[in-house]
Amino acid sequence: MTVEQLFRLPDLGEGLTEAEVLTWRVAVGDTVSIDQVVVEVETAKAAVEVPVPYAGTVLTLHADAGAVVEVGAPLISVSGGDAAAERYREEEKAGSGNVLIGYGTKEEVVSRRRRGPKIAPSAQAVAPRVLSPVVRKLAKDNGIDIATLTPSGPAGVVLRKDVEAAIAKPAPQPVAAQADAERVPLKGVRKAIADKLSRSRHEIPDATTWVDVDATGLMDAKKVLGVGVLPLMARICVAGLRKFPELNSTVDTERQEILRLRGINLGFAVQSDRGLVVPVVRGADQLTTTELAAELTRLTEAARAGSLRTEELTGGTFTLNNYGVFGVDGSTPIINHPEAALLGVGRIVDKPWAVDGQLAVRKVTQLSFTFDHRVCDGGTAGGFLRFVADCVERPLVLLAGL
């Protein structure tokens, strides 16, 4: 007699509640082995390959490519049974949740998550969730977008009455300009970015200051040291945060406290095929300029290949954004929540500049600094930006021996 083993989408860590099915690696009728990767899914953090804990024949694929599956929802059914399957069921009975082989039980996953500041429930943007398939079908059949609903159930759960209320509302009349509009689903990495930036603008009273800088010295240092502009700016940022530690912090809104962080985990913006991602150089304050350059290169390549691990995308304490690569001079970037500050670097171009009272052509860039006004005042922010600007103009003084 064929025994059907049902494998559900496991807890992927970092508090993620759902994932989109990107590609199935198997089809119905295929034979699979224990720990064989059967599907690639995309969470709000990264693409993840999911192995199955059973060996046997694939009976059912419970979600099509492109479908969004919640943690705990059916993913794949396999015939047969073995010791690994029995262990998997025992772990579920013991309360460890759906376990992804190689990721550990829920307790182990939680222990590896970043211990960041607690955020008051009232300050969190609660994403609507649907636990009942009946409610989900009702919404789908009536063209109701779950994301637009205000959930009345506990923990942001959408109930049947929420969907019925939306159905009862008269549909808005489309304007002529929208008749030919393309609708692009806001999901995956794009949705994660939108949620995080919206939360940042909602919670953080940010301010921006900027200055034009003669970067001729920076470009000379680039040639002498044989590293790029990004590693040099990263080294300068680390030095600035050591001098102004107030900016390497986060705000605990629940306890009304500012947490000044000891180590510096430097995030930097990378444009990839999956959208904007911010890899994190952990322990940046412990690395030399050469080591920083190597880690920045490694993470950039991983970001563009879509192979960054979750821990390489989380835990940042400060962000560096080199938007000059897009050919622009200035910007007022949004702080990467829950950090407290972000430095932006514009393009470096030839411009007329006064040097010792004489007009000369120099390499000039614009630096912008966006900061959380709760953690410091303009004096501190201006002091940091001026320190960075002075280092850009005379970097070899700072970088000698590093």
Image: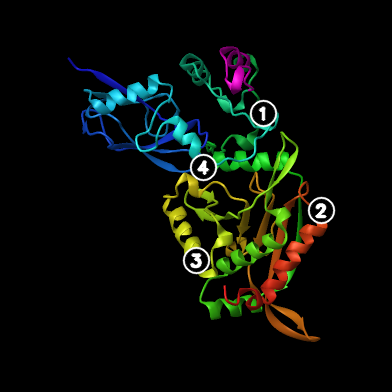
Of the pair 317 and 385, the residue shown nearer to us: 317
On residue 189, the disc is 4
Is residue 160 magenta-colored?
yes
- Compared with 375, 238 (above or below) is below
Earlier in the chain: of badge 3 and badge 4, it is 4
Earlier in the chain: of badge 3 and badge 2, it is 3
> According to the image, label 2 marks what residue?
377
Query: Distance from label 2 to label 1 (Cα)?
Result: 27 Å
Q: Which residues are magenta?
A: 150-165
| Mark 2 residue type | Asp
Number of marks = 4
| Residue 227, horizontal then vertical, whole percent | 52, 72
Of the pair 10 and 99, the residue shown nearer to us: 99
Q: Are marks 3 and 4 in contact (CB under 8 Å)?
A: no
Give the number of the mark in front: 1 or 3.
Answer: 3
Query: Distance from label 4 to label 2 (Cα)?
Result: 33 Å
> According to the image, label 1 marks what residue?
121
| Mark 1 residue type | Pro
On residue 53, the disc is none
